[in-house]
Image: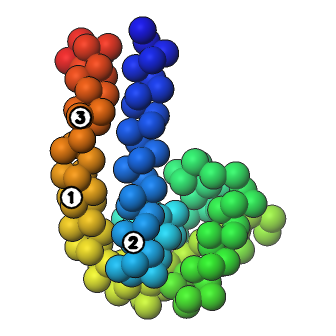
Amino acid sequence: MKLDVWDQITALFYGIENQLTEELRRSSDLGLSEFRTLKHLSEQPDLELRMQELAEFLMLTQSSTTRVVERLEKRGFVFRDSCPSDKRGKYCVLNEHGKKYIEEAAPVFQDCLERVLKKTFEQKEAREAARALCVLTGA
């Protein structure tokens, strides 16, 4: 039973993520990982994170995170900087252009998320997965 519920939840999550990715690309020409990177950086006090911390947040490998950051650098949203105490360490830093972009993109993402969730939970399978999760967790 529990593995079936996990399969339902996983399918639900990835379905939502795939729809969000499509919507974001159409509306903002930004991928979900890029959006999450900019948003997370914008929430940091110094608008920066070590690349390793960013990879952990994104749940990506170091090399995948590097590729995301490279795409954002090409768009002029971030830059990489060396760690002053450890020259091997690198930071990803949100610049003013990136900060402005994410401030404007966040409401678009919020609208997109609401549409996708509404559309998803109109489907019987999604409602069943949500109910199964509640039963499984005792909520």
| Whole-number angstrom distance, CA of label 2 to CA of label 1 | 13 Å
Disc marking residue 24: 2
Mark 1 surroundings within 10 Å by alpha-carbon count, few (fewer than 14), some (14 through 19), many (20 or more): few
Residue 19, position in %: x, y?
39, 58
In the rendered image of this protein, does residue 46 appear above or below residue 120? below
Q: Secondary structure at mark 3?
A: helix
Q: Nearer the viewer, mark 3 or mark 2?
A: 3
Disc marking residue 127: none
- Which quarter of the figure has residue 99? bottom left
The furthest residue to the right: 88
In the rendered image of this protein, does residue 35 appear above or below residue 72? above
The quadrant the N terminus occupies is top left
| Whole-number angstrom distance, CA of label 3 to CA of label 2 | 25 Å
| Residue shown at 41% from the left, 42% from the top | 13
Three-letter residue code for mark 1? Glu
Residue 79 seen:
no
Q: Which residue is mark 3?
A: 124
The quadrant the C terminus occupies is top left
Residue 3, position in %: x, y?
49, 15
Q: Which residue is mark 1?
A: 114
Would residue 43 appear left or right of 66 to someone viewing this image?
Answer: left
| Residue shown at 54% from the left, 54% from the top | 58
